[in-house]
Image (tube, rainbow, N blue to C red):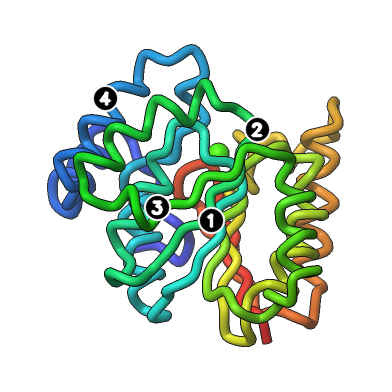
Amino acid sequence: MSNRTINLDDALYDYLLAHSLREHPEQTALREATRTHARAGMQISPEQGQFMTLLVKLIGARCTIEVGTFTGYSALTVALALPADGKVLACDISDEYTAIGKPYWQRAGVADKIELVIAPAAETLGALIAAGEAGKYDFAFIDADKTGYDGYYERCLQLVRPGGLIAFDNTLWGGDVARPAQDDDTRALQALNDKLHRDQRIDVAMLPIGDGLTLARRR
Ligand code: CA
């Protein structure tokens, strides 16, 4: 019994996966294909993906945004959780990484739900706001350059509806956020975490899943 979050050793983590994970075969295959990638650490963990699946279904999301797609596991995961008319607007700057995921999106039958835009996400999101799309999205997942998070947050906060959800990946940053910052990424995450904690425009929770996942519900 504990009044704080339990530590997961390898055996307990394996147990958690073995007793809860329900991946689509293409999710498993894409995760395997990304495992040996030089930047494989950028992919979210499968239990985090499954938690996001549950969140997307709980809020009845249909229109979603992703900032930072990498090889496409999270976009695939959210797309699988959406209804047939749902969509993921996936923002990334790398054709090379996102191309890895596309065949898996196809085989999973969700490619038509994912609109990939290769451009700086701040521009893509700004253009949506300018086009009158504010308040039309249900869910946003931010998992890109850490120094850009605050800018993505402010744009996504306009784009999601009241009651909509913004999820931020890597907010515990391997534990570095709890130590004096040595680099710009850590400083940016520390500043964002401080801001979200105080921000009265949202309800907030910070979860020790994956590398830290912060959830912000627009009030
Ligand atoms: Ca990440």
Q: Amino acid at mark 3?
A: Ile
Q: Are marks 3 and 1 in contact (CB under 8 Å)?
A: no
Q: Which residue is mark 3?
A: 6
How many angstroms separate mark 3 from mark 2 (CA)?
37 Å
Task: State which tag comes first along the sequence, 4 or 3.
Answer: 3
| SS for dot 2 | loop
Q: Which residue is mark 4?
A: 32
The foreground one among 134 and 210 is: 134
Q: Amino acid at mark 1?
A: Leu
Q: Which residue is mark 1?
A: 89
How many angstroms separate mark 2 from mark 1 (CA)?
13 Å
Residues packed near mark 4 inside 10 Å, few (<14), some (14 to 19) or many (20 plus): few
Expressed as whole percent of the image width and height from the top left, the position of residue 185 reads: 78, 34
Task: Tell whether 92 sits left or right of 36.
Answer: right
Residue drawn at x 27%, y 36% is: 104
Q: Quadrant of the N terminus?
A: bottom left
Expressed as whole percent of the image width and height from the top left, the position of residue 192 reads: 79, 55
Quadrant where ligand 1 appears: top right
Task: State which tag comes first along the sequence, 1 or 4.
Answer: 4
Residue drawn at x 33%, y 67% is: 82
Q: Which residue is mark 2?
A: 93
Quadrant location of residue 28?
top left
Quadrant location of residue 31?
top left
Q: Amino acid at mark 4?
A: Glu
| Circle nearer the viewer, 4 or 3 | 4
Total labels drawn: 4
Residues packed near mark 1 inside 10 Å, few (<14), some (14 to 19) or many (20 plus): many
Q: Are marks 2 and 4 in contact (CB under 8 Å)?
A: no
How many angstroms separate mark 2 from mark 4 (CA)?
23 Å
| SS for dot 1 | strand
